[in-house]
Amino acid sequence: MNNLAAHPDLIPTYEPHRLEALRPYQVLSVPGQQLFNDLVSIVAKLFGVPVALVSLVEAEEVVFAGNVGLPGLERVARPDSLCSVAVLQDGATVYENLLVRPCHLTTPGAAAALDLQFYAGQPLRSADGFAIGTLCVMDHAPRTFSAEESVLLASLGDVATALLDLRVALETDPNLAGALRQRVDARIGQSLTRIDTLASLQQWEATPDTEAAQDYRRSSREEATQVVRGLHAELRQTLADLPR
C-alpha cells in the first residue's frame, strides 16, 4: 500500500518505455466502453463505493475506458488525476482521507472539485511489465482499506488487464470480434447479475452492521472472489487460444 502524500516530487511527464508499452492499447482510448463499464459496475458493488474507473494514463491526459459514478467525465488532464500517481507505483496507491492527507502530486483541489475523499488504485501492467493504467475505486467519504481489499483489488486488476489485452486483439483483428466478444460479454453479464443479487440482499438490512448484513456481505465477498478467479482464468485461456 503506497501513500505518497508526504513526497512532493513531480509526476514525470515523459516516460518513453511506459508510453511505448501503452501504444497498442491506444486503440481503446475511447471513453466509456460498455465492457469496461460493466466491469467497474461490478467493482463498485464489491467495494461498496459509488465510483470505480478503468483508466489509461497517456502522456498528457488520463482516459476513462470504464466509468461508473462520474457521469460525463471522459478524460482529465494528467496532473488532475490520482491515477497518474498510482500508475507509477508497484502496488496499490491508497489515500484513505484526502481531506486530512491530500495528494501533493496532483493539481491542488482536483479531487475536492469532484467531492472525492477516498482513493485506491491498482496499476494495470502490460505483458512486459509496464503500467499502462489503473483500476481504481473512490468514495465521497473517508474510509479504511484493508489488506483483504487490497488483494481483491489486485485480482480485479488482473481481470481488467486481461480484458484490455483481449480488446486490443479484437480491435486489431476484426475477424476475431464476433464470437469472442459474445463469450466475454456473456460471462461479464452473469457476474454482474450475481453480484447485483447479493448486493440487493445486503441492502435489505436497515442496519448495515447487523449480523445478517455482515453475513450477506461476507457471502458476497466470498462468491465474488470465486467469480473473479474464474473470469480471469477464462480470459487468460481465451487469450492463449487466439491465433498467432
Image: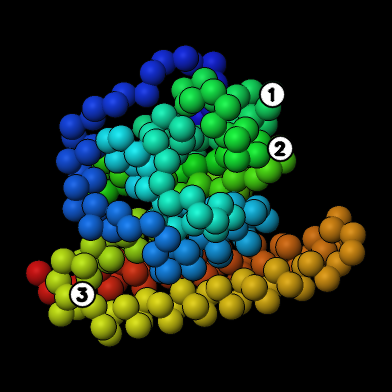
Say which element carries label 2: loop
| Amino acid residing under circle 2 | Pro
Quarter where residue 100 is shown = top right
In front: label 3 or label 2: 2
Looking at the picture, how far across and down is residue 81, in whole percent? 46, 36
Horizontal arrangement in the rendering, residue 33 relative to residue 224 (left or right): left
Q: Which residue is mark 2?
A: 142
Give how far apart the Cα atoms at labels 3 and 2 are. 43 Å
Numbered tag placed on residue 151 in the rendering: none
For the point 28% across and 79% down, the residue is 180
Residue pointed to by mark 1 = 100
Residue 121, given in percent of the width and then of the height, sits at 49, 42
Please determine whether, in this image, residue 97 is positioned above or below residue 226: above
Which residue position is annotated with label 3? 241
Residue 138 locus on image (x, y percent): 60, 45
Q: Residue furthest left?
A: 244
Q: Residue furthest front?
A: 72
